[in-house]
Image (spheres, coloured by chain):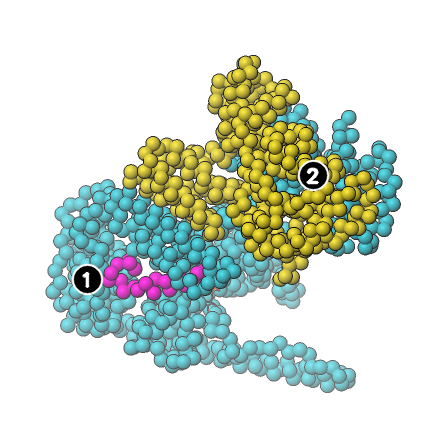
Amino acid sequence: MSLWVDKYRPKTLDQLSFHDSISQNLRALARSGDFPHLLIYGPSGAGKKTRIYATLNEIFGSQVEKLKIDVKTFVTSSNRKMEFNVLSSAYHLEITPSDMGNNDRVVISDLLKDVASTEQVDFSHQNTSKTKHRFKVVVINEADSLSRDAQAALRRTMEKYSSNIRLILVCNSISNIIPPIKSRTLLVRIPSPSTTAISSILGQVAKKEGIKFSSSNELDIQKYLVTLADTANRNLRKALLSFETVAMQNETIQLDNKTLTIVTLDWEEIIKNMSNTIRINRNVATLASVRVVLYELLAHCIPPRIILKTLMFNLIKNFKDDAVISQLVDLGSVFDERLSLGSKSIFHLEGFVAKSMVVIDSN
Amino acid sequence: MTAEQVLSTIPDADLPEDVEDKKFNFFAKKAADASTGTGESVQIPEAQPNCLSGLTIVFTGVLPRLDRDTSENLAKRYGAKVTKSISGKTSLVVIGDEAGPSKIKKIKSLHIKAINEDGFIQLLQSMPMEGGDGAAAQKAKLKREEEERKIVEEAEEEERRAQEEEARQKRLLEARKAASIEKASHSQSSHREPAEVPRIIPDSEKLWTVKYAPSRIDQLCGNKGQVQKLQNWLSNWFDNAKKDFKVPGRDGSGIYRACLISGPPGIGKTSAAHLVAKSLGFDILEKNASDVRSKSLLNSNLKSVLTNTSVVGFFKHRDENIQHTQNDRRFCLIMDEVDGMSSGDHGGAGALSAFCKITHMPMILICNDKSLPKMRTFDRVTLDLPFRRPSEAEMKSRLMSIALREKIKLDPTVIGQLVQATGNDIRQIINLLSTVSKTQSSIGGEQAKDAANSWKKQTVLKPFDITARLLNAQIYSPNAKHSLNDKIDLYFNDIDFAPLMIQENYLSTRPSDARTPQDHLRRVANAADDISESDRINSLIRSSEQQWSLLPFHGVMSSVKPSSQVAGQISQRINFAGWLGQNSKAMKYQRMLQDLQYHTRLRTSTDKKELRLDYLPTLRQRLTEPLLQGEEQGIQPVIDIMDYYYLTKEDWDNIVDLGVGRYKGELVLKGISTKTKSAFTRSYNSTTHPIAIYKTGNSVGAMVSSKKNVDYEDVIEDDTNTPDKDDEEVDPDKIDSKKDKLIKEVKPKKTARKAKAAPKGRKK
Ligand SMILES: Nc1ncnc2c1ncn2[C@@H]1O[C@H](COP(=O)(O)OP(=O)(O)O)[C@@H](O)[C@H]1O
Ligand SMILES: Nc1ncnc2c1ncn2[C@@H]1O[C@H](COP(=O)(O)OP(=O)(O)O)[C@@H](O)[C@H]1O
């Protein structure tokens, strides 16, 4: 039993539904026998990972779905032992640099060296049909969070081991990727799927799961699914997940009842309430109570920048006056920068709340 | 000139005719204050030493410019006696705004001289040294001289005793040495070393705080009442034990098996506990609670101790043949720094308080701050003995006698300044004296003030004091003679805590010149802005760039500037920096999330952030809804999902725990009936489940063998299936094989797959 997102995740390039031209290009690359380093970027829930795995599937066959997790131990320069997990199949491995903390440079270069040198052994062992690809693929998630050092090291490794390693870097935005890496990789942008693409995927899932709607009118259903895609910000994963939640909560989905059929996630709801309090009661006592809520959110792993962003959008929704909106957005960007440069998130979130109370007050 | 003469030159303050009980309006008052042009502070005059001697002064109401503490300290510093209530002995009343009506009535009926703040300052300026030559002043002087004489006597007495003690020790040592030598010579074996003789440290090498640690109960300064209470409680302990701690007794202490002494550091809490226990003939077991941080450690540590019998009691019993029924248990357990324990783990305090309910020996707990939330668990199980800082008067004689014995001349008035500088911390004062005595042989007169000032700098302020001072409006007033550097110094007292403490408490002040709530908010917002900016500076300092030269700037932005915005009256208790606790809580949840991601990674395609934001709400729904609605029918579907995502039961708990708001862990758990919950746990534990992560790589022997166990179990579980041949073959040579890597690549995959098959097979 699994969630729909995982249950209905396409496995091969043929099953992929949207962005057909990208799929075709990937297929062509996979078949060519040689394969460049890839830098795949785009918003989350756009289907990057799905596409990568479909491509790997095309190259190596279904063996790549046989995943396992290894715990690797590394000794850092300061002689501290460190463990981190590597997801791998016989043909590829997948790493996430944020798991490694500040040591990402050492870890990555060691790991790649390791892969490059052990790879021959592996292949002499496995005399299967697919040996025409004499390289192993290393997928690096969240490549934009790699430190500069690590990126520089990566660039050297890319050339040194190009005979037997191919890298696939995955990230949301390439602004943090250093140019030498960009120039050594094939950039593939995967934009968010359109709302219609999402709604048709949702529709197929609904059919397969036998979901009941209050009306059988295709158009109504279509319209509802489009709103669902919209509220999920065209994030396919989010859309699928919230669709499943709705389906679980309602035996029959009432198409005309928005409150029952649009999901607000636990944390979204809290931020929404917070923004209402800020709008109505602007004083120091409110600020003190907001602090408690902010701490609660931060403790429960809601990233501070997400809190800031969601809060700001919730706040500006309440205003028609462009002056207020622009000032609030201004504040949002200032504190967003501080969030990324500082280390104590609560300081900045509280600063934003306090400042925006004053802005609202003085307009 | 006498005090009466001086007082007659000072105009009477006008006493309000009849004062209604007005409701105090904060903002209205602020506005009024501001309009009458306060804010500028007074020049406190330099008065003659001891000039207020012999006067008994009462301060009442709010003085316009001096705050209560300053004015009272001022009066005390110059030798006046400050009392709280007006009586016939009161020589004058300094009256401010909003004085209580009853006080005013009393002043009128007793015909006591009442002056206002200006009058008080005038008084300071004009009083002669030693309070002039009025009768009261003379009497006070005599009394003081008498006191000093007594101190000298006491000190001499003590000195004598100390010398005797030392001599006795020496004799003892000598005797023992002689004995051991004799013994050595008696026994013919020539290579035997003389038995180890315990070294007795001569007094002169000891720290002063040790050397002058109170050795008798009456040497403890202050807190006499509490010490008495402690004594009563401890001496009646075994009688109370006989009554099973059911009878409260005269002072209500009979129902407690443990007591909790609380109070600031260096005021003799530990000393008191030891002295009282010793004087009642207890054997003392001392534990520093900070050492036993976790619950389990505490359990094992205390359990053994609590069933101990006292060695002293044991021997007494035999030697003296006295039938003490409980004598074999004359043990007293002292736990120091209870609030220091369990900073990482709340179980500790809870476990300790559980011990307090069942202990078979008296327990004395000692802590600094009883008001911390985690200390609340001790509330009803311990006898509460709050210790206060001993006042100047209470420690004067002790300090003087120390000074005498060390042959330093200590001017009694300096003590007042010392007491102020250290915040009534005797330990610190003694330490200071000891440091100073190395360079100076007399302290007093002219140097007193300098010395006190420089000592003030030497004493390290506690985070609470830093916060209290920074958030107090006074240091920002133009007359405060408190330069920016002084303020930055406050920050440097504790560069880690000061910013955190300011951030925690800056919302709870009433800024002195904010007239409207909007104004207040604006100030708070500015402060918040500064604090936020200071975090960036902090990052520059602490990051790899290590720009330590930015520290003063950080001090300004994180502490001084925000405090200057909101400084005023502190309207609540100063709280301890909450950030630390919140941060460690966040780290804990981050680790939980990390584990969840590792476990689910084989099935999902998302990172940590999105796992929490998007996946978990739905996953939680799938993992709890069946239990909420289907009760026990829901268990199997939930376990199926868990197995698919390689989630353990602990992960299940964590996923529920990660919810917020409407889906807060506790709320969700409340909805599931206890029966279902335990059935769920039972049926989860009764089957095996797939595991996602295996250790490989350069792992050491221990890991390999534990891994083998896992495999082995799986093979057994799986005996319905035909066992894999190659599986069996691989196993034996696995442990020491150098080809580790290859084998392992094959292995875990297989077990994972098989384990997954196992529960499915069982589920008919
Ligand atoms: N082409 C597609 N057709 C159907 N579903 C898809 C497609 N691409 C992605 N999905 C669904 O969207 C989810 C998120 O995709 P994923 O590749 O993980 O996004 P990203 O890596 O961009 O964050 C997947 O779990 C899958 O269920
Ligand atoms: N009330 C007191 N009377 C005399 N000396 C004291 C007193 N309080 C503290 N001291 C001195 O300070 C030292 C430390 O006291 P201690 O009992 O350890 O304080 P606490 O436990 O309150 O932190 C003692 O050894 C003693 O020299």
Asked if A64 appears above or below B354 in the picture, the reply is above
**Amino acid of disc 1:** Phe
Q: Is mark 2 within 8 Å of ligand 1?
A: no
x and y percentages locating residue A143 in the rendered image: 59, 47
* Residue at the image point whose x is 39% and y is 61% from the top: B553
The numbered mark at residue A30 is: 2
> Which residue is depicted at the point 54% across and 14% down?
A217
Q: Chain of mark 1?
A: B
The chain shown in yellow is which?
Answer: A
Q: Tell me whether circle 2 and circle 1 mark residues in contact (CB < 8 Å).
A: no
Residue B591 x, y percent position in the rendering: 59, 46
Residue farthest to the top? A216
Residue A29 location (% of width, % of height): 67, 39
Please, which chain is the residue tagged with disc 2 on?
A
Identify which residue, B703 or A129, lies in the foreground. Answer: A129
User: Against B484, is B722 above or below?
Assistant: above
Q: Say if A250 sits above or below B180 in the image.
A: above
Kind of residue indicated by mark 2: Ala
Residue that label 1 marks = B120
Q: Quadrant of residue A286?
A: top left
Q: Which residues are magenta?
A: B474-496
User: What secondary structure is marked by label 1?
Assistant: helix
Neighbor class of circle 1 (other Cα within 10 Å; few <14, some 14-19, many 20+) is many
Q: Is residue A265 visible?
A: yes
Residue A70 location in percent, x, y? 71, 47
Quadrant in the picture for residue B677? top right
Q: Is residue B279 left or right of residue B89?
A: right
- Does the magenta segment cover residue B494? yes
